[in-house]
Image (cartoon, rainbow, N blue to C red):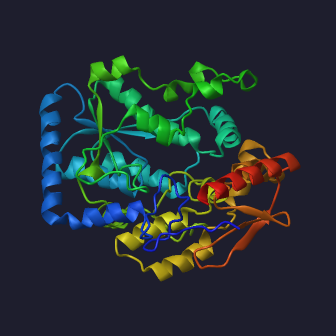
């Protein structure tokens, strides 16, 4: 049996991506957030003033193109970014959306209203659906992440467009590594090709899929995924800033602002794997089967993400969060069957592949069932094992190696 360590303040396990839990039982993300709070109001005023100076500089510099580019999905955070840039500081942004094809209806409405609300030009880049279906399936098999194409498109298409339009400033939202608490709020964090490749794209690029000849994918299928060369980036002077590095970040506040000022639409139907109805509307699988794979891999899900953030921002008590995690994190949502039909895969094959990504730090096998420890103390069974004998042997060997390293 594996003893899983959980943060004493939020609900994250030690297996959460890039997370560290110190000997005091508090995770690095909670500590980073505490530092954000302890900085005080004056600190955040200074940070916003710094952002303001940067924006004025680029607005004065860019006479023949857009003042900046904002990658947007049409979600609550996109609206907050555009509100600050276009409404508060009066810049003329170009909005750019990567379209991964599986939007919820209310998300499409939110996205399409942005150009009206913010008086902005808007480019929506939609790759071939045939290519997207192939990539959903291939990336699931290769890395257990059917949404790889989304991560790649979101972090590539806007940079391609910025380079072609000679727009040197890109405004991102929150820092994408906020889960782990890697940086201090006083650090000047900027977007980089390395972060894109290692964090967002999981260390893969489009060439890793195109070189598989039997899938008949070539460069023309991946123009949206072909990141500009270093020379092009340097010649264009492109830099990407995270607005969350200058303004205190709170997803609930962003949603409340978007609803109040712009009649932004939340999800009409409750999600099956989390209690929030205002996060990740741009892809039907993000809160569903994509997140189910995170639970399969690391033993926690989207509900743990949302609850941990809401605990830190004072919107929820930990005991309530634990009850929500118990209710939602393990659910096999119905969108799994939508996705299986989308890529033409059987449910049995899905679980055979999914099981190969189980993390031996949090899962173990007993009587041909998967078990893991829980926040509420008692281990539970979460489905039968689909691995073959050799795969089970390999998994058990990796687990013994991990346990030995702890002794």
- From the top left corner, tell me how far across and down residue 138 is, in percent: 69, 37
Q: Nearer the viewer, residue 143 or 121?
A: 143
Against 305, residue 348 (above or below) is: above
**Residue 373, picture quadrant:** bottom right
Q: Residue 133: give x, y in percent of width and height.
A: 67, 38
Residue 405 in the figure: left or right of residue 231: right
**Quarter that holds the N terminus:** bottom right
* Placement of the C terminus among the 4 image quadrants: bottom right
The percent position of residue 348, horizontal first and vertical second, equals 83, 52
Q: Nearer the viewer, residue 228 or 161?
A: 228
Q: Residue at x 85, y 46 (%)?
A: 390
Does the image show residue 267?
no
User: Hey, which quadrant is residue 249 in on the image?
Assistant: bottom left
Residues 322 and 125: in front is: 322
Q: Residue at x 37, y 67 (%)?
A: 252
| 58 sits to left or right of 21 | left
Residue occupying the point 28% across, 24% down: 166
Give the residue at the far front of this rendering: 407
Q: Above or below — where is 101 with respect to 8? A: above
The location of residue 327, given as percent across then percent down, is 61, 76
């Amino acid at each position: 049996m594996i003893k899983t360590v959980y943060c004493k303040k939020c609900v994250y396990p030690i297996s959460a991506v890039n997370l560290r839990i110190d000997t005091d039982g508090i995770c690095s993300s909670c500590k980073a957030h505490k530092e954000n709070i302890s900085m005080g109001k004056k600190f955040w005023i200074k940070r916003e003033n710094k952002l303001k100076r940067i924006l004025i500089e680029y607005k004065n510099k860019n006479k023949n193109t857009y003042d900046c580019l904002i990658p947007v999905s049409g979600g609550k955070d996109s609206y907050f970014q555009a509100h600050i840039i276009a409404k508060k500081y009066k810049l003329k942004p170009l909005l750019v959306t990567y379209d991964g094809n599986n939007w919820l209806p209310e998300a499409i409405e939110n996205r399409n209203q942005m150009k009206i609300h913010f008086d902005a030009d808007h480019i929506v880049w939609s790759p071939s659906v045939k290519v997207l279906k192939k990539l959903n399936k291939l990336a699931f098999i290769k890395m257990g992440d059917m949404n790889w194409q989304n991560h790649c498109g979101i972090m590539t298409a806007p940079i391609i467009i910025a380079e072609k339009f000679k727009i040197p400033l890109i405004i991102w939202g929150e820092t994408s590594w906020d889960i782990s608490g890697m940086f201090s709020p006083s650090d000047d964090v900027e977007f980089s090709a390395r972060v894109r490749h290692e964090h967002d794209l999981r260390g893969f690029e489009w060439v890793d899929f195109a070189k598989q000849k039997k899938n008949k994918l070539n460069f023309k299928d991946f123009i949206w995924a072909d990141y500009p060369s270093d020379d092009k980036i340097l010649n264009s002077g492109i830099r990407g800033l995270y607005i969350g590095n200058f303004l205190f970040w709170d997803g609930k506040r962003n949603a409340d602002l978007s609803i109040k000022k712009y009649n932004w639409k939340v999800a009409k139907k409750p999600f099956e794997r989390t209690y929030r109805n205002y996060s990740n509307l741009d892809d039907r699988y993000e809160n569903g089967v994509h997140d189910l794979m995170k639970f399969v891999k690391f033993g926690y899900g989207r509900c743990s993400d949302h609850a941990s953030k809401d605990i830190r921002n004072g919107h929820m008590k930990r005991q309530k969060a634990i009850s929500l995690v118990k209710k939602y994190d393990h659910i096999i949502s119905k969108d799994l069957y939508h996705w299986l039909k989308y890529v033409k895969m059987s449910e049995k094959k899905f679980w055979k592949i999914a099981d190969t990504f189980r993390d031996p730090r949090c899962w173990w096998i007993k009587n041909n069932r998967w078990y893991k420890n829980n926040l509420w103390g008692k281990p539970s069974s979460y489905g039968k094992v689909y691995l073959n004998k050799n795969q089970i042997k390999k998994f058990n060997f990796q687990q013994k190696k991990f346990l030995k390293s702890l002794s």
